[in-house]
Amino acid sequence: MRVFKFGGASVKDAAGIKNVYDVLQKAGYEDVLLVVSAMGKTTNALETVIKNYFDKSAELNSSVQEVKKYHNQILMDLFEEEKHEVFTAVNNQFSELEYFLAHNKSPNYNFVYDQIVSYGELISTTILSHFMSFMGIKTQWLDVRNYIKTDATYRDAEVDWELTQKNIAKNVKRKILNITQGFLGSDENNFTTTLGREGSDYTAAIFAYCLNAESVTIWKDVPGVMNADPRYFENASLLNQISYREAIELAFYGATVIHPKTLQPLQKKEIPLFVKSFINPLLPGTRVAKGADLEPYLPCFIVKRNQLLISLSSIDFSFIMEENISEIFALFHQFKIKVNLIQNSAISFSVCVEDKFENFKDLNAILSKKFKVEFDENVTLYTIRHFNDKAAATVEENKTVLLKQVSRETMQVVTKEN
Ligand code: ADP
Ligand code: ASP
Ligand code: MG
């Protein structure tokens, strides 16, 4: 079996969905499981709905209508007549979402977030599977929540591999095009959970692992994994082959083309991952598999924007030692702040972090009681794997360098734009 993943960009409009059909014609669809994300920027739009809901904003209804309108337009473009049953199916999903908003009593933001945001994937896969059937491909729509079981850490759920493996092994039919949702799972009470933003790549890897798949292909709007994000680097080149180890490093440092959790399950079973263009599906793209570390061997650039550089120093000139450091890390973990770089000296300790859940203010209140806290907001973290002098000069050009760290393979620079 092969697992294909189509992300938001590939299904952002009717033309995109028709293109998925073309890709399937070229790549084959027998014995394939499709993992699909929400259409275009739907997840962001649903995040706005959730925010409006908690803010009791007057915009709540209009923000829901916007999501509806967007999907309705896609439906009208794909299916000529409104009599097609997909219109009712999608309409029912929106009614469920509205029912939830009207009746929910839970004040738990993360719980509510997952119950709402999941409609993005539920609706996109409903549309996609109806369209594939309409075009004559025999499909089976799977509710991923019956397969991927997780703990109840809403918005960042941990997979229960044993249960998930059991569910997938017994229920996924072969010889047919299976279509399911990326990003979602469910907890032991069957409430919807999500695996973290951009988590659909990971879903593809979970299925591949449990199905002992032959390969995973993630179809992207770029030719494959490049040595830099082509949106920000003009001269980015395609990487043909990357080892699992190198790919894990690149994803860990923030190459957003692959979700970092995707690689470990694939590496365990040596399942190759292909990253290919949905625009040119016959081109080879990038192969992540056992073999050469990086081919061609080039410096790889990774940019993380909107970082926070925090420096802690002891108030009384005492050393910052293991004990303080472990306490500081426990706090970062508790506040779900991701540490991307660490540097320490005798009396000070600097970290470049990502505050995805906007918890720094609360954390700062605690830290400030024990340390002198200084911070720079909105800084950029550049990572260069396999750096050389020329590559280093490119990222430092016209910027103020706040912190720099060099190891054998990797150079990291925190900068502020001038
Ligand atoms: P999806 O539609 O699957 O969610 P994403 O938008 O998450 O796709 O990922 C594709 C994007 O990743 C590309 O448009 C590109 O801008 C970005 N990207 C970041 N780093 C790289 C890289 N090293 N190589 C290729 N693309 C990259
Ligand atoms: N739709 C989700 C998101 O935008 C998951 C994904 O696309 O991978 O984060
Ligand atoms: Mg994405």
Image (tube, rainbow, N blue to C red):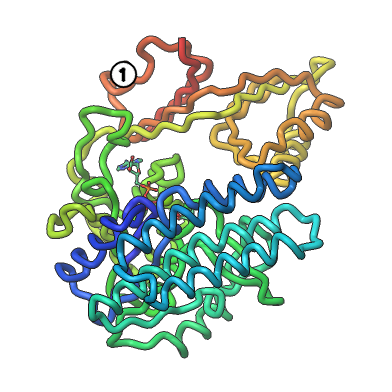
List the single residue furthest toward the right. Answer: 369
Name the image quarter holding the N terminus.
Answer: bottom left
Whether residue 1 is visible, yes or no, is: no
Instruction: Please name whichever residue, 336 or 32, is drawn nearer the observer in this view of the structure.
Output: 32
Vertical arrangement, residue 105 with respect to residue 234, above or below = below
Q: Residue at point 64% right, 50% down?
A: 61
| Residue of label 1 | 394
Q: Position of residue 222 (x, y in %)?
A: 25, 46
Residue labelled 1 has its Cβ within 8 Å of some atom of ligand 1: no
Q: Quadrant of residue 178?
A: bottom left
Classed neighbour count for the residue bearing mark 1: other residues with Cα under 10 Å, few (<14), some (14–19), many (≥20): few
Q: Quadrant of residue 19?
A: bottom left
Q: Position of residue 348 (x, y in %)?
A: 69, 21
Whether residue 305 is visible, yes or no, is: yes
Identified by mark 1, the residue type is Thr
Q: Position of residue 155 (x, y in %)?
A: 63, 56
Q: Residue at point 78% right, 19% down?
A: 372
From the viewer's perspective, tell me whether residue 287 is left or right of residue 76: left
The residue tagged with tag 1: helix, strand or loop? helix
Vertical arrangement, residue 11 with respect to residue 393, above or below = below
Q: Residue at point 17% right, 58% down?
A: 281
Q: Residue at point 47% right, 66% down?
A: 123
Instruction: Please name whichever residue, 120 or 142, is drawn nearer the observer in this view of the structure.
Output: 120
Vertical arrangement, residue 289 with respect to residue 9, above or below = below
